[in-house]
Image (spheres, helix red, strand yellow):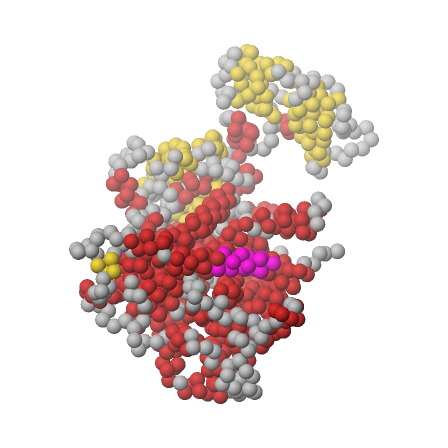
Amino acid sequence: MKHRPWFLYTMVVFGLAFFYVPILSMIVYSFNASRLATVWGGWSTKWYGELFQNEQVLEAAILSLKIAVVSATAATVLGTLAGFALARVKRFRGRTLFSGLVTAPLVMPEVITGIASLMLFILMAQWIGWPQRRGFSTITIAHITFSLVFVATIIRARLLSMDRDIEEAAVDLGSRPWQVMWDVTLPVISPAILAGWLLAFTISLDDVVITNFTTGPGNTTLPILIWSKVKLGVTPDINALATITVCIVGLGVVVAGLLLNRAEKRRQKDEAMAYQENR
Amino acid sequence: MADGPAALEAPVAEAAAGAPFVRVEGVSKKFGTFLAVDDVSFDIARGEIFSLLGGSGCGKTTLLRMLAGFEEPTKGRIHIDGRDVTDVPPYERPVNMMFQSYALFPHMSVEKNIAYGLKHEPLSRGERADRVAEMLELVQLQDYGGRKPHQISGGQRQRVALARALARAPKLLLLDEPLAALDKKLREHTQFELMSIQEQTGVTFIVVTHDQEEAMTLSSRMAVMEKGRIRQIGTATDIYEYPQNRFVADFIGSINLFEGQVRAVSGGVAQVEVEELGQVSVTAEGEVAAGQPVTLALRPEKLSLSRTEPEAQNRVAGTVESLAYFGKDSLYRIRLASGRVVSANAPNARRGGEGQWVADWEDDVWLSFAPSSAILLVE
Amino acid sequence: MAAITDPLEDEASRRRRLGRWFHRQGYMQGIIAIPYIWLVAWFLVPFLIIFAMSVATRTPTAPPFGFGGENPLLNWSHYERLFTDSLYIRAYLTSLVNAVAATALCLVIGYPIALGIARASRSWRSILLMLVILPFWTSFLLRVYAWIGLMGTNSWFNEMLTAVWNGLVPQAWELAYVPLMNTNAAVILVTIYSYLPFMILPLYANLERLDLTLDEAAMDLGSRPMRVFWDITLPQSVPGIIAGGMLVFIPACGEFIIPNLVGSASRPMIGAVINDEFAYARDWPMASTVAVALLFLLVVPLMVYTWAEQRAEDKARAREQEG
């Protein structure tokens, strides 16, 4: 007789319902014909049509994507370097401060990070004349700073769990340190680098608070636009926008998950076959 | 890389006759305050398979890593083929290593793995491919060149690691626990394969292992290490039959050790007083003097078992306390009058039939041994 | 090179030799310098500005602060106000209460979910885990927004809650709708919703690694399932509880968006107070002072967390070295 933890399974089901009911409700109401967001007025897709003609939304989305791509790429480069420093260099001047700088933004309340960055930008404008206008560049700098520490954390963890023997093997086989880096280390940790980029991209695309403080007039990202609209209440077009976002992200994550799962299964099958062949 | 092309050619005996191929000279390694390797010196001849044998933490792996160049000796020099390589970084040493974990590059195929070290050699594309094919043939993996490391079995990975390390035709190949990750059956087979590959290539091997049987089968000579020091260097026979100290005697195989004192020495035979055995006579090889405290070491298989009191001079009575049957032989645990329990091996030369005595539980028996079978240890 | 006679050979030659071998020095200096300079410029400097600003004096200039000159060099009055003005004290308490409540409820809800996933069959585990992570990848803002839709006075969810409430209580207490929006309860509810995955994931990571034969051993020795949980599972999952608790508590304390959208304007949390001082009162020094105070609120749990992390890492390293 095996004991089945029914209570736990029930909680899992309730937990998943808690996660998904609000999102599903939002999706259903995005097809609501009524202008009143909470009163059902029949099925309609008109809000989607309006959304695609709303230039303000499209502009904001494009700006958000631009910032996300640039900041994720820069954050991945800087974060990978920082991850290397933390995982591989046991002693250097100011290591304690450096590891503090890589951890602190993870726990710093966003309001503080945002206001602190804004103060810096204002003071810099006063003292050195840059930035005269806040917008793309200031938002991107703030996003890079914020998301590079996430990348660094991922890369550091990957490097610490990596088998150092393969690097030594490459040195043993005649490669110089920088060659080892290109031939062995970077290819082996490349999935972690990709994961870091995706995380940085998502963080940037999603950020409201820090963007709110570091943006200037006329530079509205999508989350800022949504935020300002949501403050005024629930509207069907936001429901539609939210549904599109959720669907794109959901699809992306599910596809990535399935691909990873399939790669893992194939690897297991290969290993099992190799094992049997040699018996 | 200065040594690359030279290393690829078959090694020529350019060194003066009699000069050692590898010379380790007073090498020590400190990690913080921990002395991992303590003033180790030894010489290895060209074409030897030399083992570093010892328990975990004895410094054997650190010593190997210093030979590869991954660690720098705190003190001492290392010479390979007449050249001082102490300050040469690993990527310039004519030495390659087979890692315990094999350390195959997971993102490269078997072929690419083997070819990796060759890209630093001035070879044409064709020469490189030939060399890879040659290596694949050497380890009998011709059909596996395109596979990734995770697509082959543990035994095949081991062979790829070997082929990769040999591809650059190193002067010296270092093998870190080469068989530890294989299961028992495969291990025996691979042992002989390693020896035949060594013979074919003529490369000098240094093997690190914790497995004494592996060291004994594989190597021409071995060094037994303890706490960063070498306790004895010699052939398998030297180490097993003529251990120089208690540690080596106890570490290799099983052995009975007794404390005693030399009473008299004459004509190469010492009379030793041992509390549990009485006075016994033992062939004395080293320098022992009367009155000296010694340890008497007796291998279980050197003890003969009989029902009646034997003629031999060295004998003692006891009772069989337990026995374990292993098929080809049996191990007896015999309690002496003093309460001391001694191990003795007896071959099961015949199938126990009528009239054939075989010792059983609780039997009273006699143990005896020849003076030349016992080992006297002064350390 | 001269023969080395002393193990403590001269420093210069040692350094030269070390420099050749990559994981020790050499080009790693460059690798460190680039992110280091970036973080100092864009994180450390603003952070220090906050500290400096908290002792500056508010002036009607632009930017609105003075430092030295006719103003006092160190103006501690803002810190005094922090302890005397009920606005700040109330904001603190609200933040603390909300964060503690959200963390505790996340633990109560998240623990059985994490345990349930950890005890599910292998194939189910990865699916369930993905279902928990999926909402975390969708926009934070939109997840808050989804609840605004649910909590509104005439939404289906609110109507359902109202019906349940009216069915349970005496007639005198019946309501036309459940007042959810713009309350502190709404802030706690949405905080739980947003941060529950942060509780479940570290707990799951911890629970999944537990050795189930220990449970079997305890049962074999006569413990009932509930007893096994208290004696075996729960003590072993303390690191997961600490990690999950910190991951919820810390962002919940400084939360800005959730109270802004669903909270009550009369009971602001610290984040809102900082923003108001800065943006509306244009009192940079006071905003900075409240920010510094918020950081102090986070220091204690952070130290606990770092300590626990460090201990776990040391343990793992010790185990690795033994092996």
Vertical relation: A233 (above or below) A43: above
Residue in view at x 72 percent, y 45 percent: C222
The residue furthest right is: B354
Residue span colored magenta: C98-112
Q: Position of residue C71 (x, y in %)?
A: 20, 55
**Can you tell which quarter of the image residue A11 is in?**
bottom right
> Does C204 sit left or right of A144 as displayed?
right
Q: Nearer the viewer, residue A206 or B266?
A: A206
Residue lying at 43% horizontally and 68% vertically, measured from the top left: C265
Q: Position of residue B243 (x, y in %)?
A: 52, 28
Image vertical order of residue C33 relative to residue B35, above or below: below
Decide whether the magenta segment is chiefly helix, strand or loop: helix
Total residue callouts: 0
- Residue placed most toward the observer, B187 or B17: B187
Q: Position of residue C154 (x, y in %)?
A: 55, 78
- Residue C99 vs C304, above or below: the answer is below
Q: Residue at x 39, y 62 (%)?
A: C271
Taking the image as drawn, is residue B304 in sight? yes
Q: Residue furthest left?
A: C69
Magenta-drawn stretch contains A69: no
Q: Is residue B375 left or right of residue A84?
A: right
Residue found at x 54% / y 47%:
B179
* Residue A201 in view of the camera: no
Q: Position of residue A82 (x, y in %)?
A: 35, 57
Snapshot quadrant of residue A39: bottom right
Is A88 situated left or right of A235 in this image? left
